[in-house]
Amino acid sequence: MNGWVRTYRQSKNVGFIQLYDGSCSKDLQIVISPPQGTFLTGDCIKVNGELIPSPKPLQPFEVSCHSWELLGSSQGDAYPLQKKNMTYEYLREIAHLRPRTSTFSSIFRLRSHICYAIHEFFNLQNFFYVNTPILTTNDGEGGSSPFRVTTLDPGEKDFSQDFFKEPSLLCVTGQLEAELLAMGLGKVYTFGPTFRAENSHTTRHLSEFWMIEPEMAFADLRQNQTLALDLLKFVVKKILTNHSDELECLQKFDIHPPLDSLEKFLSTPHSLISYTDAVELVQKSKVSFEKQISWGDDLQTEHERYLCEKVYNGPLIIENYPKSLKAFYMYVNDDDKTVAAMDILVPGMGELIGGSQREHRLDILEKQMIDKHIPIDKFQWYLDTRRFGTCPHSGFGLGLERLISWITGVINVRDAIPFPRTPGNCVF
Ligand code: 4AD
Ligand code: MG
């Protein structure tokens, strides 16, 4: 067995090593009798021995060590992970070492299981996994905050001399290209990194995050909602059924997966309200919000959390938002005031999913683009989908780190990704 020493203690004539190799949430006890040498937390060792039933009920088995070899010493007191009561802020500063803690190895194993479950779900539903560009020249949301990509020297502004001969960006979404692919493949999904240069210092925002974006031809907003709920349920069920040991491990370290609430989500019908009803509920509530709203205003986080946690006490879909609040590509409803948009909110988090039915009628889409100052000439390729055999279609975006945070109970999305990028921080 190869692994790293979590702890070492010696009693009388026996030495006990708690060894981990990252494969699961449990340590393996190595018993050395009589003790030979001493071990430091973080040491990497190779152990030869015999796997035997454990005499104490603390673990089912242990290894009786015959010989061992030091592969890498951890240099004693300098090893930063020995401190007691390390805060999550401190651990973020040493993000290169935190995968070695029980907490973060569990979180990152869960991240892997969640990703795998998402792929499994889409594969079972006959979606094709597609890859959309990361380097792009379109800001797919219109008015989002993209990162610029350039090979020009600082100060140079002549983009005709730039690598792509025009201003280029990191993608904020893969949606527009996913729509193109859905017109040829029917049902597709992307699963990739997206980048936003928003100056948001919250527990829910990252500058680089991973997004899952399904796109379905011949689907309306209802079918979109069903797909989103089915996906969430599939993933939650997989994790609760197959990886409860990892969730239990987190509880030991003061992270509390909302197990009851997740179970309830699996067994109860979903809640769905319109934006208009949401505003009315906020206005009628007795809670004193920091911000009052009227129809047409964006729901603030405090309002979303009130609706989701206090009124509905579980995941909540809000649909049909004012068209002024949402992106240019959303389907304009018959009232000509709202669009067929949906946000899915979850307790403790707020928005987990954002999606819509897409505007597939060329004339209305063009009008929306003009109204929202989208440079139509640069989007002819996008409009071609509406020119040549257009059809109703829908999709959504699910933020991976928010999904992980919701399921695991991790408070800050910065702890749901190995190396978080946030304003002022791009280390490692
Ligand atoms: O609501 P958003 O901006 O929607 C889109 O980008 C659409 N193009 C998706 C689509 O319809 N295909 O982002 C979707 C989700 C959010 O609900 C949230 O979970 C996550 O992406 N998200 C972020 N996660 C972490 N940090 C950020 N800065 C995020 N911005 C969005
Ligand atoms: Mg959104």
Image (spheres, rainbow, N blue to C red):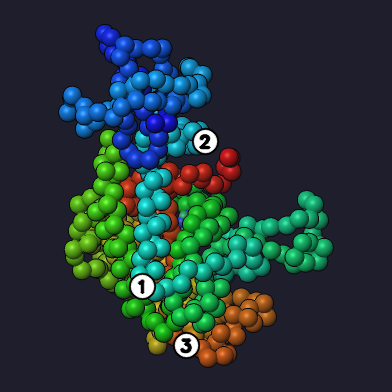
Toward which corner of the image does residue 263 lie, by quadrant? bottom left
Instruction: Read off the residue under disc 1.
Output: 125
Asked if residue 251 is positioned above or below residue 367 in the image, the reply reads above
- Beta carbon of the mark 3 residue lies under 8 A of ligand 1: no
- Residue type for callout 1: Gln
Q: Residue at x 53, y 91 (%)?
A: 389
Whether residue 297 is visible, yes or no, is: no
Q: Badge 2: how crowded within 10 Å, few (<14), some, or many (20+)?
A: few
Give whichever of 274, 118 is nearer the camera: 118
Q: Mark 2 or mark 1, which has the lower sequence index? A: 2
Toward which corner of the image does residue 125 lie, by quadrant? bottom left
Toward which corner of the image does residue 371 lie, by quadrant? bottom right
Q: Badge 1: how crowded within 10 Å, few (<14), some, or many (20+)?
A: few
- Residue type for callout 3: Cys
Q: Position of residue 42 (x, y in %)?
A: 44, 25
Are circles 2 and 1 on residues that touch, CB within 8 Å? no
Distance from disc 3 to disc 2, alpha carbons, whole Å, reads 48 Å
Q: Badge 3: how crowded within 10 Å, few (<14), some, or many (20+)?
A: some
Whether residue 421 is visible, yes or no, is: yes
